[in-house]
Image (cartoon, coloured by chain):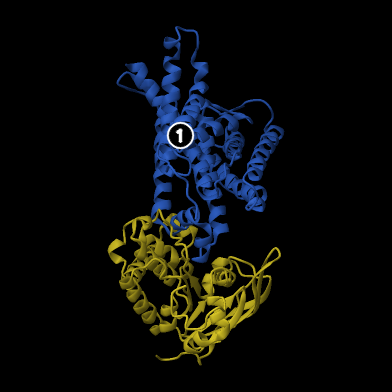
Amino acid sequence: MDIFLQQLINGLVLGSVYALVALGYTMVYGILELINFAHGEVTMIGAMVALSVIGALVGHVALPGVVIVAMGVLVAVPVCMLLGFTIERVAYRPLRHAPRLAPLITAIGVSILLQNLAMIIWGREYVKFPPILSSATHQVAGATISDLQIFILVLSLLIMAGLVALVQKTKLGRAMRATAQAPQVAALMGVNVNSVISLTFIIGSAIAAIAGVMVAAYYGLAHYYMGFMLGLKAFTAAVLGGIGNLAGAMLGGLLLGVIESLGAGYIGDITGGFMGSNYQDVFAFFVLILVLVLRPSGLLGEQVGERA
Amino acid sequence: MTSRSDGPILLETRGLSKQFGGLAALHAVSLNIHHGEIFGLIGPNGAGKTTLFNCLTGLYTPSAGEVRLDGQRLNGLKPHTVAKQGLARTFQNIRLFSHMSALENVMVGCHVRTKANVLGAIFRNRGTRDEEAAIRSKAHELLKLVGVDKHAHSLAKHLPYGDQRRLEIARALATEPKLLALDEPAAGMNPAERVALIALIQALRATGIAILLIEHDVKLVMGLCDRVAVLDYGEKIAEGAPEAVQRDPKVIEAYLGGSIGGAIGQPA
Protein backbone atom coordinates (compact mmCIF):
# COMPACT_ATOMS: atom_id res chain seq x y z
CA MET A 1 0.00 0.00 0.00
CA ASP A 2 2.82 2.42 0.81
CA ILE A 3 4.33 1.93 -2.66
CA PHE A 4 0.98 2.85 -4.14
CA LEU A 5 0.69 5.99 -2.03
CA GLN A 6 4.31 6.93 -2.67
CA GLN A 7 3.93 6.58 -6.42
CA LEU A 8 0.65 8.49 -6.27
CA ILE A 9 2.39 11.42 -4.56
CA ASN A 10 5.31 11.33 -6.97
CA GLY A 11 2.86 11.14 -9.85
CA LEU A 12 0.85 14.12 -8.69
CA VAL A 13 3.98 16.24 -8.32
CA LEU A 14 5.27 15.25 -11.75
CA GLY A 15 1.77 15.60 -13.17
CA SER A 16 1.32 19.11 -11.84
CA VAL A 17 4.43 20.15 -13.79
CA TYR A 18 3.11 18.40 -16.92
CA ALA A 19 -0.14 20.27 -16.37
CA LEU A 20 1.62 23.65 -16.26
CA VAL A 21 3.43 22.97 -19.53
CA ALA A 22 0.29 21.46 -21.08
CA LEU A 23 -1.58 24.71 -20.37
CA GLY A 24 0.78 26.50 -22.75
CA TYR A 25 0.07 23.99 -25.54
CA THR A 26 -3.64 24.06 -24.99
CA MET A 27 -4.01 27.86 -24.76
CA VAL A 28 -2.20 28.36 -28.04
CA TYR A 29 -4.12 25.53 -29.69
CA GLY A 30 -7.40 26.96 -28.41
CA ILE A 31 -6.75 30.27 -30.12
CA LEU A 32 -4.74 29.41 -33.22
CA GLU A 33 -5.36 25.66 -33.69
CA LEU A 34 -1.59 25.42 -33.81
CA ILE A 35 0.59 22.94 -31.94
CA ASN A 36 3.43 25.10 -30.69
CA PHE A 37 6.12 22.42 -30.70
CA ALA A 38 8.67 24.99 -29.52
CA HIS A 39 6.89 25.24 -26.18
CA GLY A 40 8.96 22.46 -24.58
CA GLU A 41 12.09 24.39 -25.51
CA VAL A 42 10.74 27.52 -23.83
CA THR A 43 10.52 25.43 -20.66
CA MET A 44 14.12 24.33 -21.12
CA ILE A 45 15.33 27.90 -21.70
CA GLY A 46 13.50 28.92 -18.51
CA ALA A 47 15.35 26.26 -16.52
CA MET A 48 18.70 27.14 -18.10
CA VAL A 49 18.40 30.89 -17.54
CA ALA A 50 17.32 30.37 -13.94
CA LEU A 51 20.23 27.97 -13.36
CA SER A 52 22.70 30.49 -14.79
CA VAL A 53 21.44 33.14 -12.39
CA ILE A 54 21.39 30.70 -9.47
CA GLY A 55 24.89 29.45 -10.35
CA ALA A 56 26.21 33.01 -10.45
CA LEU A 57 24.70 33.87 -7.07
CA VAL A 58 25.42 30.71 -5.06
CA GLY A 59 28.57 31.15 -2.99
CA HIS A 60 28.74 34.86 -3.73
CA VAL A 61 25.77 36.19 -1.82
CA ALA A 62 24.68 35.28 1.67
CA LEU A 63 21.02 34.71 0.92
CA PRO A 64 18.80 31.72 1.74
CA GLY A 65 18.54 29.14 -1.04
CA VAL A 66 14.86 29.83 -1.59
CA VAL A 67 15.57 33.51 -2.27
CA ILE A 68 18.34 32.67 -4.75
CA VAL A 69 16.02 30.30 -6.62
CA ALA A 70 13.29 32.92 -6.60
CA MET A 71 15.72 35.42 -8.14
CA GLY A 72 16.54 32.87 -10.83
CA VAL A 73 12.83 32.50 -11.56
CA LEU A 74 12.37 36.28 -11.62
CA VAL A 75 14.93 36.49 -14.43
CA ALA A 76 13.79 33.37 -16.28
CA VAL A 77 10.13 34.40 -16.45
CA PRO A 78 10.60 37.69 -18.36
CA VAL A 79 13.22 36.09 -20.63
CA CYS A 80 10.74 33.36 -21.55
CA MET A 81 7.90 35.86 -21.97
CA LEU A 82 10.02 37.73 -24.47
CA LEU A 83 10.98 34.46 -26.14
CA GLY A 84 7.35 33.34 -26.44
CA PHE A 85 6.33 36.72 -27.86
CA THR A 86 9.19 36.61 -30.37
CA ILE A 87 8.46 33.03 -31.47
CA GLU A 88 4.87 33.93 -32.30
CA ARG A 89 5.84 37.18 -33.99
CA VAL A 90 8.61 35.69 -36.14
CA ALA A 91 7.63 32.09 -36.75
CA TYR A 92 3.81 31.97 -36.63
CA ARG A 93 2.25 35.35 -37.37
CA PRO A 94 3.63 35.66 -40.92
CA LEU A 95 2.04 32.24 -41.57
CA ARG A 96 -1.32 33.00 -39.94
CA HIS A 97 -3.22 32.43 -43.17
CA ALA A 98 -0.93 29.78 -44.62
CA PRO A 99 -1.94 26.11 -44.81
CA ARG A 100 -1.87 24.38 -41.40
CA LEU A 101 1.27 22.40 -42.17
CA ALA A 102 3.45 25.49 -42.65
CA PRO A 103 3.38 26.83 -39.05
CA LEU A 104 3.76 23.27 -37.78
CA ILE A 105 7.03 23.03 -39.69
CA THR A 106 8.29 26.41 -38.45
CA ALA A 107 7.37 25.26 -34.93
CA ILE A 108 9.64 22.24 -35.29
CA GLY A 109 12.27 24.53 -36.82
CA VAL A 110 12.15 26.91 -33.86
CA SER A 111 12.35 23.94 -31.52
CA ILE A 112 15.55 22.64 -33.18
CA LEU A 113 16.98 26.15 -33.31
CA LEU A 114 16.44 26.72 -29.59
CA GLN A 115 17.89 23.32 -28.67
CA ASN A 116 21.05 24.05 -30.61
CA LEU A 117 21.27 27.58 -29.31
CA ALA A 118 21.02 26.24 -25.76
CA MET A 119 23.69 23.66 -26.55
CA ILE A 120 26.03 26.42 -27.73
CA ILE A 121 25.34 28.64 -24.71
CA TRP A 122 25.18 26.06 -21.90
CA GLY A 123 27.11 23.17 -23.43
CA ARG A 124 26.26 19.51 -23.96
CA GLU A 125 26.72 18.49 -20.33
CA TYR A 126 24.09 18.34 -17.64
CA VAL A 127 23.86 21.59 -15.69
CA LYS A 128 23.56 20.79 -12.00
CA PHE A 129 21.01 22.42 -9.74
CA PRO A 130 22.99 23.39 -6.62
CA PRO A 131 21.70 21.71 -3.42
CA ILE A 132 20.48 24.93 -1.84
CA LEU A 133 16.84 24.02 -1.26
CA SER A 134 15.53 22.28 1.83
CA SER A 135 15.75 18.51 1.50
CA ALA A 136 13.57 17.85 4.52
CA THR A 137 10.99 15.12 4.12
CA HIS A 138 7.78 14.20 5.86
CA GLN A 139 6.19 10.82 6.48
CA VAL A 140 2.56 10.53 5.43
CA ALA A 141 0.88 7.15 5.99
CA GLY A 142 3.99 5.23 5.10
CA ALA A 143 4.96 7.43 2.14
CA THR A 144 7.58 10.14 1.99
CA ILE A 145 6.98 13.63 0.69
CA SER A 146 9.66 16.30 0.52
CA ASP A 147 9.37 20.04 1.08
CA LEU A 148 10.19 20.56 -2.58
CA GLN A 149 7.39 18.22 -3.67
CA ILE A 150 4.89 20.04 -1.48
CA PHE A 151 6.10 23.36 -2.82
CA ILE A 152 5.86 22.27 -6.46
CA LEU A 153 2.38 20.86 -5.97
CA VAL A 154 1.03 23.89 -4.12
CA LEU A 155 2.58 26.46 -6.45
CA SER A 156 1.32 24.57 -9.51
CA LEU A 157 -2.21 24.45 -8.16
CA LEU A 158 -2.07 28.18 -7.34
CA ILE A 159 -0.88 29.02 -10.87
CA MET A 160 -3.63 26.87 -12.38
CA ALA A 161 -6.28 28.52 -10.20
CA GLY A 162 -4.92 31.94 -11.13
CA LEU A 163 -5.03 31.15 -14.84
CA VAL A 164 -8.58 29.84 -14.63
CA ALA A 165 -9.63 33.03 -12.81
CA LEU A 166 -7.87 35.14 -15.44
CA VAL A 167 -9.60 33.36 -18.32
CA GLN A 168 -13.05 33.10 -16.72
CA LYS A 169 -13.36 36.36 -14.79
CA THR A 170 -11.43 39.12 -16.52
CA LYS A 171 -11.81 41.25 -19.59
CA LEU A 172 -8.59 39.80 -21.02
CA GLY A 173 -9.93 36.28 -20.44
CA ARG A 174 -13.19 37.13 -22.22
CA ALA A 175 -11.20 38.53 -25.12
CA MET A 176 -9.13 35.32 -25.22
CA ARG A 177 -12.20 33.10 -25.26
CA ALA A 178 -13.95 35.29 -27.84
CA THR A 179 -10.85 35.19 -30.05
CA ALA A 180 -10.65 31.40 -29.69
CA GLN A 181 -14.28 30.97 -30.70
CA ALA A 182 -14.58 33.49 -33.54
CA PRO A 183 -11.50 35.64 -34.19
CA GLN A 184 -13.01 37.77 -36.97
CA VAL A 185 -16.09 38.58 -34.93
CA ALA A 186 -14.00 39.34 -31.85
CA ALA A 187 -12.04 41.85 -33.95
CA LEU A 188 -15.27 43.50 -35.09
CA MET A 189 -16.25 43.89 -31.44
CA GLY A 190 -13.07 45.85 -30.84
CA VAL A 191 -10.83 43.04 -29.60
CA ASN A 192 -7.27 43.48 -30.83
CA VAL A 193 -6.77 39.88 -31.91
CA ASN A 194 -3.04 40.20 -32.47
CA SER A 195 -2.41 41.47 -28.95
CA VAL A 196 -4.60 38.75 -27.49
CA ILE A 197 -2.57 36.13 -29.38
CA SER A 198 0.72 37.71 -28.26
CA LEU A 199 -0.49 37.76 -24.66
CA THR A 200 -1.50 34.12 -24.89
CA PHE A 201 2.05 33.20 -25.88
CA ILE A 202 3.50 35.47 -23.20
CA ILE A 203 1.37 34.01 -20.40
CA GLY A 204 1.98 30.42 -21.55
CA SER A 205 5.73 31.06 -21.70
CA ALA A 206 5.82 32.62 -18.23
CA ILE A 207 4.16 29.50 -16.83
CA ALA A 208 6.54 27.32 -18.84
CA ALA A 209 9.54 29.11 -17.32
CA ILE A 210 8.32 28.34 -13.81
CA ALA A 211 7.64 24.72 -14.79
CA GLY A 212 11.16 24.47 -16.22
CA VAL A 213 12.72 25.60 -12.94
CA MET A 214 10.51 23.12 -11.06
CA VAL A 215 11.72 20.24 -13.22
CA ALA A 216 15.34 21.30 -12.83
CA ALA A 217 14.95 21.58 -9.05
CA TYR A 218 13.10 18.27 -8.83
CA TYR A 219 15.61 16.21 -10.81
CA GLY A 220 18.56 18.35 -9.67
CA LEU A 221 19.73 19.05 -13.22
CA ALA A 222 18.88 20.63 -16.54
CA HIS A 223 19.98 19.81 -20.05
CA TYR A 224 19.64 21.41 -23.47
CA TYR A 225 17.56 18.42 -24.57
CA MET A 226 15.20 18.32 -21.57
CA GLY A 227 12.49 20.35 -23.32
CA PHE A 228 11.96 17.71 -25.97
CA MET A 229 10.66 14.90 -23.77
CA LEU A 230 8.95 17.30 -21.35
CA GLY A 231 7.21 18.97 -24.29
CA LEU A 232 6.05 15.64 -25.70
CA LYS A 233 4.70 14.54 -22.33
CA ALA A 234 2.89 17.83 -21.81
CA PHE A 235 1.49 17.65 -25.34
CA THR A 236 0.25 14.14 -24.54
CA ALA A 237 -1.34 15.49 -21.36
CA ALA A 238 -3.08 18.23 -23.35
CA VAL A 239 -4.41 15.71 -25.88
CA LEU A 240 -5.47 13.36 -23.09
CA GLY A 241 -7.53 16.11 -21.44
CA GLY A 242 -8.87 17.48 -24.73
CA ILE A 243 -6.60 19.96 -26.45
CA GLY A 244 -7.88 23.53 -26.39
CA ASN A 245 -9.54 22.95 -23.01
CA LEU A 246 -7.84 24.46 -19.93
CA ALA A 247 -9.44 22.13 -17.39
CA GLY A 248 -8.55 19.27 -19.71
CA ALA A 249 -4.87 20.21 -19.73
CA MET A 250 -4.78 20.25 -15.93
CA LEU A 251 -6.66 16.97 -15.58
CA GLY A 252 -4.60 15.39 -18.36
CA GLY A 253 -1.34 16.53 -16.78
CA LEU A 254 -2.14 15.19 -13.33
CA LEU A 255 -3.54 11.96 -14.75
CA LEU A 256 -0.54 11.39 -16.97
CA GLY A 257 1.85 11.98 -14.08
CA VAL A 258 -0.01 9.46 -11.93
CA ILE A 259 -0.25 6.87 -14.73
CA GLU A 260 3.47 7.18 -15.41
CA SER A 261 4.42 6.97 -11.77
CA LEU A 262 2.22 4.01 -10.95
CA GLY A 263 3.28 2.32 -14.17
CA ALA A 264 6.95 2.78 -13.33
CA GLY A 265 6.32 1.54 -9.79
CA TYR A 266 4.62 -1.66 -10.79
CA ILE A 267 6.09 -2.51 -14.19
CA GLY A 268 8.80 -4.63 -12.55
CA ASP A 269 6.22 -6.74 -10.73
CA ILE A 270 3.95 -7.02 -13.74
CA THR A 271 6.66 -8.19 -16.13
CA GLY A 272 8.42 -10.31 -13.52
CA GLY A 273 11.45 -8.02 -13.54
CA PHE A 274 11.79 -8.15 -17.34
CA MET A 275 11.17 -4.38 -17.64
CA GLY A 276 12.21 -1.76 -15.09
CA SER A 277 11.11 1.75 -14.20
CA ASN A 278 13.30 3.09 -17.01
CA TYR A 279 10.37 2.14 -19.23
CA GLN A 280 8.40 4.97 -17.58
CA ASP A 281 8.13 6.93 -20.83
CA VAL A 282 6.35 4.04 -22.52
CA PHE A 283 3.23 4.74 -20.51
CA ALA A 284 2.83 8.33 -21.66
CA PHE A 285 2.93 7.38 -25.30
CA PHE A 286 0.81 4.29 -24.78
CA VAL A 287 -1.78 6.65 -23.28
CA LEU A 288 -1.40 9.01 -26.26
CA ILE A 289 -2.05 6.16 -28.69
CA LEU A 290 -5.05 4.93 -26.71
CA VAL A 291 -6.60 8.40 -26.56
CA LEU A 292 -6.06 9.04 -30.26
CA VAL A 293 -7.69 5.72 -31.12
CA LEU A 294 -10.52 5.66 -28.60
CA ARG A 295 -11.38 9.30 -27.93
CA PRO A 296 -9.47 11.67 -30.22
CA SER A 297 -11.18 14.72 -28.72
CA GLY A 298 -9.78 13.89 -25.27
CA LEU A 299 -11.48 13.40 -21.92
CA LEU A 300 -13.05 16.88 -21.67
CA GLY A 301 -12.88 17.86 -25.33
CA GLU A 302 -15.91 18.51 -27.50
CA GLN A 303 -16.70 15.78 -29.96
CA VAL A 304 -16.91 18.17 -32.88
CA GLY A 305 -14.50 21.03 -33.40
CA GLU A 306 -16.21 24.20 -34.45
CA ARG A 307 -15.01 27.39 -35.95
CA ALA A 308 -17.02 30.42 -36.92
CA MET B 1 -43.15 58.29 -41.40
CA THR B 2 -40.56 60.87 -40.55
CA SER B 3 -37.73 61.09 -42.99
CA ARG B 4 -34.24 61.62 -41.62
CA SER B 5 -32.64 61.76 -45.01
CA ASP B 6 -31.65 65.40 -44.98
CA GLY B 7 -29.35 65.46 -41.93
CA PRO B 8 -25.54 65.53 -42.07
CA ILE B 9 -23.84 62.60 -43.76
CA LEU B 10 -22.64 59.82 -41.44
CA LEU B 11 -21.37 57.10 -43.75
CA GLU B 12 -20.10 57.79 -47.20
CA THR B 13 -18.76 55.27 -49.70
CA ARG B 14 -17.27 56.52 -52.91
CA GLY B 15 -16.53 54.28 -55.89
CA LEU B 16 -16.31 51.24 -53.64
CA SER B 17 -15.22 48.15 -55.62
CA LYS B 18 -14.21 44.64 -54.67
CA GLN B 19 -12.70 42.15 -57.09
CA PHE B 20 -12.38 38.43 -56.38
CA GLY B 21 -10.02 37.31 -59.10
CA GLY B 22 -11.85 38.22 -62.29
CA LEU B 23 -15.19 38.67 -60.58
CA ALA B 24 -16.34 42.15 -59.63
CA ALA B 25 -18.45 41.49 -56.53
CA LEU B 26 -18.87 45.23 -56.07
CA HIS B 27 -18.43 47.82 -58.76
CA ALA B 28 -18.06 51.53 -57.99
CA VAL B 29 -20.77 51.73 -55.35
CA SER B 30 -21.34 55.17 -53.88
CA LEU B 31 -23.73 55.63 -50.99
CA ASN B 32 -24.51 58.29 -48.43
CA ILE B 33 -26.17 57.43 -45.15
CA HIS B 34 -27.26 60.27 -42.90
CA HIS B 35 -27.25 60.57 -39.14
CA GLY B 36 -30.30 58.91 -37.62
CA GLU B 37 -31.42 57.37 -40.90
CA ILE B 38 -32.69 53.85 -41.51
CA PHE B 39 -31.17 52.88 -44.82
CA GLY B 40 -32.15 49.69 -46.59
CA LEU B 41 -29.92 47.70 -48.91
CA ILE B 42 -31.72 45.18 -51.05
CA GLY B 43 -30.96 43.12 -54.09
CA PRO B 44 -31.24 39.58 -55.39
CA ASN B 45 -29.05 36.81 -53.95
CA GLY B 46 -25.40 37.33 -54.81
CA ALA B 47 -25.88 41.01 -55.61
CA GLY B 48 -22.97 41.97 -53.33
CA LYS B 49 -24.82 43.15 -50.22
CA THR B 50 -22.77 41.16 -47.73
CA THR B 51 -19.57 41.94 -49.66
CA LEU B 52 -20.39 45.61 -49.15
CA PHE B 53 -20.86 44.99 -45.41
CA ASN B 54 -17.53 43.20 -45.25
CA CYS B 55 -15.80 46.09 -47.02
CA LEU B 56 -17.35 48.59 -44.62
CA THR B 57 -16.31 46.71 -41.51
CA GLY B 58 -12.75 45.95 -42.57
CA LEU B 59 -13.19 42.20 -43.07
CA TYR B 60 -12.42 42.74 -46.76
CA THR B 61 -10.01 45.29 -48.17
CA PRO B 62 -11.78 47.13 -50.99
CA SER B 63 -10.03 46.92 -54.39
CA ALA B 64 -10.83 50.57 -55.01
CA GLY B 65 -12.78 53.44 -53.53
CA GLU B 66 -13.13 54.62 -49.99
CA VAL B 67 -15.37 54.46 -46.94
CA ARG B 68 -15.75 57.39 -44.57
CA LEU B 69 -17.59 57.48 -41.28
CA ASP B 70 -18.16 60.99 -39.95
CA GLY B 71 -15.43 62.15 -42.30
CA GLN B 72 -12.92 59.62 -40.92
CA ARG B 73 -11.52 57.19 -43.49
CA LEU B 74 -12.32 53.59 -42.51
CA ASN B 75 -10.80 51.47 -45.22
CA GLY B 76 -7.28 50.44 -44.40
CA LEU B 77 -8.15 50.31 -40.70
CA LYS B 78 -8.06 47.00 -38.83
CA PRO B 79 -11.49 45.59 -37.93
CA HIS B 80 -11.00 46.31 -34.22
CA THR B 81 -10.35 50.00 -34.91
CA VAL B 82 -13.36 50.19 -37.23
CA ALA B 83 -15.47 49.22 -34.21
CA LYS B 84 -13.85 52.05 -32.27
CA GLN B 85 -14.81 54.55 -34.98
CA GLY B 86 -18.45 53.69 -34.40
CA LEU B 87 -19.50 51.04 -36.90
CA ALA B 88 -20.90 47.74 -35.63
CA ARG B 89 -22.60 44.89 -37.43
CA THR B 90 -24.48 41.64 -37.10
CA PHE B 91 -24.17 38.62 -39.36
CA GLN B 92 -26.47 36.91 -41.79
CA ASN B 93 -25.37 33.52 -40.46
CA ILE B 94 -25.36 34.12 -36.72
CA ARG B 95 -21.82 34.34 -35.38
CA LEU B 96 -22.03 34.50 -31.62
CA PHE B 97 -19.35 33.35 -29.20
CA SER B 98 -21.35 30.18 -28.77
CA HIS B 99 -19.54 28.81 -25.71
CA MET B 100 -19.91 32.04 -23.74
CA SER B 101 -23.00 33.18 -21.89
CA ALA B 102 -25.33 35.73 -23.47
CA LEU B 103 -24.12 38.26 -20.91
CA GLU B 104 -20.47 37.59 -21.71
CA ASN B 105 -21.14 37.97 -25.41
CA VAL B 106 -22.40 41.48 -24.79
CA MET B 107 -19.53 42.18 -22.38
CA VAL B 108 -17.04 41.39 -25.15
CA GLY B 109 -18.82 44.06 -27.19
CA CYS B 110 -18.07 46.57 -24.42
CA HIS B 111 -14.38 45.85 -24.95
CA VAL B 112 -13.80 48.66 -27.37
CA ARG B 113 -15.03 51.37 -25.00
CA THR B 114 -13.09 50.27 -21.91
CA LYS B 115 -9.59 51.00 -20.76
CA ALA B 116 -8.50 48.24 -18.36
CA ASN B 117 -5.30 46.61 -19.59
CA VAL B 118 -3.43 43.38 -18.89
CA LEU B 119 -1.91 44.59 -15.66
CA GLY B 120 -5.37 45.47 -14.44
CA ALA B 121 -6.53 41.98 -15.33
CA ILE B 122 -3.71 40.43 -13.32
CA PHE B 123 -3.65 42.72 -10.31
CA ARG B 124 -7.39 43.43 -10.13
CA ASN B 125 -6.99 47.00 -8.95
CA ARG B 126 -9.86 49.22 -7.94
CA GLY B 127 -10.32 50.86 -11.33
CA THR B 128 -10.47 47.49 -13.07
CA ARG B 129 -13.06 46.12 -10.66
CA ASP B 130 -15.25 49.23 -11.00
CA GLU B 131 -15.02 49.09 -14.76
CA GLU B 132 -15.89 45.38 -14.72
CA ALA B 133 -18.99 46.12 -12.64
CA ALA B 134 -19.96 48.92 -15.04
CA ILE B 135 -19.53 46.63 -18.05
CA ARG B 136 -21.66 43.99 -16.38
CA SER B 137 -24.55 46.32 -15.64
CA LYS B 138 -24.38 47.90 -19.10
CA ALA B 139 -24.52 44.41 -20.64
CA HIS B 140 -27.55 43.56 -18.52
CA GLU B 141 -29.30 46.74 -19.69
CA LEU B 142 -28.61 45.95 -23.34
CA LEU B 143 -29.94 42.42 -22.89
CA LYS B 144 -33.09 43.92 -21.38
CA LEU B 145 -33.37 46.39 -24.28
CA VAL B 146 -33.40 43.60 -26.88
CA GLY B 147 -35.48 41.35 -24.61
CA VAL B 148 -32.99 38.55 -23.98
CA ASP B 149 -32.26 39.30 -20.31
CA LYS B 150 -33.99 36.15 -19.10
CA HIS B 151 -31.27 34.14 -20.88
CA ALA B 152 -28.38 36.25 -19.55
CA HIS B 153 -26.54 33.30 -18.04
CA SER B 154 -27.32 30.66 -20.67
CA LEU B 155 -24.68 29.76 -23.21
CA ALA B 156 -25.31 31.65 -26.44
CA LYS B 157 -25.63 28.42 -28.40
CA HIS B 158 -28.54 27.30 -26.21
CA LEU B 159 -30.69 30.38 -26.95
CA PRO B 160 -33.70 30.12 -29.24
CA TYR B 161 -32.95 31.26 -32.78
CA GLY B 162 -34.77 34.58 -32.64
CA ASP B 163 -33.09 35.42 -29.34
CA GLN B 164 -29.69 34.64 -30.85
CA ARG B 165 -30.39 37.24 -33.54
CA ARG B 166 -31.39 39.79 -30.90
CA LEU B 167 -28.34 38.92 -28.83
CA GLU B 168 -26.16 39.74 -31.83
CA ILE B 169 -27.81 43.15 -31.95
CA ALA B 170 -27.17 43.70 -28.21
CA ARG B 171 -23.53 42.72 -28.68
CA ALA B 172 -23.16 45.16 -31.57
CA LEU B 173 -24.84 47.91 -29.53
CA ALA B 174 -22.35 47.37 -26.73
CA THR B 175 -19.67 48.88 -28.98
CA GLU B 176 -21.73 52.12 -28.88
CA PRO B 177 -21.97 52.46 -32.65
CA LYS B 178 -23.03 55.54 -34.61
CA LEU B 179 -24.05 53.20 -37.41
CA LEU B 180 -25.45 49.74 -36.80
CA ALA B 181 -25.33 47.45 -39.83
CA LEU B 182 -27.81 44.57 -39.67
CA ASP B 183 -27.33 41.71 -42.12
CA GLU B 184 -30.75 40.08 -42.60
CA PRO B 185 -31.85 40.46 -38.98
CA ALA B 186 -35.33 39.06 -39.68
CA ALA B 187 -34.14 35.89 -41.42
CA GLY B 188 -35.84 32.88 -39.88
CA MET B 189 -38.00 34.93 -37.52
CA ASN B 190 -41.72 34.27 -37.13
CA PRO B 191 -44.24 37.11 -37.69
CA ALA B 192 -44.44 38.02 -34.00
CA GLU B 193 -40.66 38.17 -33.73
CA ARG B 194 -40.56 40.37 -36.82
CA VAL B 195 -42.96 42.86 -35.27
CA ALA B 196 -40.79 43.02 -32.16
CA LEU B 197 -37.69 43.47 -34.33
CA ILE B 198 -39.25 46.39 -36.22
CA ALA B 199 -40.16 48.06 -32.92
CA LEU B 200 -36.60 47.52 -31.69
CA ILE B 201 -35.04 49.04 -34.82
CA GLN B 202 -37.32 52.05 -34.55
CA ALA B 203 -36.48 52.45 -30.87
CA LEU B 204 -32.77 52.35 -31.69
CA ARG B 205 -33.16 54.98 -34.36
CA ALA B 206 -34.98 57.16 -31.87
CA THR B 207 -31.82 57.12 -29.73
CA GLY B 208 -29.90 58.63 -32.66
CA ILE B 209 -28.21 55.53 -34.08
CA ALA B 210 -28.31 55.21 -37.86
CA ILE B 211 -29.25 51.78 -39.19
CA LEU B 212 -28.04 50.08 -42.35
CA LEU B 213 -30.29 47.15 -43.08
CA ILE B 214 -29.82 44.28 -45.49
CA GLU B 215 -33.05 42.37 -45.76
CA HIS B 216 -34.72 39.95 -48.12
CA ASP B 217 -38.15 40.71 -46.78
CA VAL B 218 -39.01 43.57 -49.11
CA LYS B 219 -42.19 44.42 -47.20
CA LEU B 220 -40.19 44.92 -44.03
CA VAL B 221 -37.63 47.09 -45.81
CA MET B 222 -40.25 49.19 -47.52
CA GLY B 223 -42.18 49.81 -44.31
CA LEU B 224 -39.18 50.62 -42.17
CA CYS B 225 -36.57 52.43 -44.24
CA ASP B 226 -36.26 56.13 -45.00
CA ARG B 227 -34.29 55.37 -48.12
CA VAL B 228 -33.36 52.25 -50.01
CA ALA B 229 -30.56 51.33 -52.39
CA VAL B 230 -30.76 48.35 -54.72
CA LEU B 231 -27.71 46.33 -55.70
CA ASP B 232 -27.61 44.00 -58.68
CA TYR B 233 -24.50 42.18 -59.88
CA GLY B 234 -22.38 44.41 -57.65
CA GLU B 235 -23.71 47.69 -59.00
CA LYS B 236 -26.12 50.15 -57.49
CA ILE B 237 -29.08 50.27 -59.86
CA ALA B 238 -31.43 52.44 -57.84
CA GLU B 239 -31.57 54.60 -54.75
CA GLY B 240 -34.24 56.73 -53.14
CA ALA B 241 -37.46 56.65 -51.18
CA PRO B 242 -38.94 53.14 -50.89
CA GLU B 243 -42.04 53.94 -52.97
CA ALA B 244 -39.98 55.35 -55.84
CA VAL B 245 -37.51 52.48 -55.82
CA GLN B 246 -40.35 49.99 -55.81
CA ARG B 247 -41.67 51.40 -59.10
CA ASP B 248 -38.26 51.67 -60.75
CA PRO B 249 -38.29 49.49 -63.90
CA LYS B 250 -34.65 48.51 -63.41
CA VAL B 251 -35.43 47.16 -59.95
CA ILE B 252 -38.43 45.24 -61.19
CA GLU B 253 -36.29 43.73 -63.92
CA ALA B 254 -33.55 42.75 -61.47
CA TYR B 255 -36.02 40.96 -59.22
CA LEU B 256 -38.37 39.47 -61.77
CA GLY B 257 -36.05 39.01 -64.71
CA GLY B 258 -37.97 41.58 -66.70
CA SER B 259 -40.57 39.09 -67.87
CA ILE B 260 -43.50 40.59 -66.05
CA GLY B 261 -44.10 44.04 -64.67
CA GLY B 262 -45.71 44.71 -61.36
CA ALA B 263 -44.92 45.32 -57.76
CA ILE B 264 -42.16 43.56 -55.90
CA GLY B 265 -44.17 43.33 -52.75
CA GLN B 266 -43.42 39.63 -52.31
CA PRO B 267 -40.50 38.37 -50.32
CA ALA B 268 -37.71 37.27 -52.62
Whether B191 is drawn above or below A221: the answer is below
Please provide percent x and percent y for residue B175: 46, 71
Whether A63 is drawn above or below B35: the answer is above
Q: Chain A: what color?
A: blue
Quadrant housing the N terminus of chain B: bottom left
Please provide percent x and percent y for residue A271: 45, 9
Give the total number of marks visible in the rendering. Answer: 1
- Determine crowd level at label 1: few under 14, some 14-19, many 20+ residues with C-alpha closer than 10 A: many
**Is B130 in front, or is B3?**
B3
Please provide percent x and percent y for residue A160: 42, 43
Residue A136 appearing in the image: no
Please provide percent x and percent y for residue A187: 53, 63
Dividing the picture into quarters, in which one does residue A232 lie?
Answer: top right
Whether A285 is drawn above or below A211: the answer is above
Residue farthest to the front, as pictured: B259
Residue B26 appearing in the image: yes
Give the secondary structure at mark 1: helix
Q: Which chain's residue wears label 1? A: A
Q: Residue at x 47, y 54 (%)?
A: A181
Three-letter amino acid code of the residue under disc 1 = Leu
Q: Which residue is mark 1?
A: A240
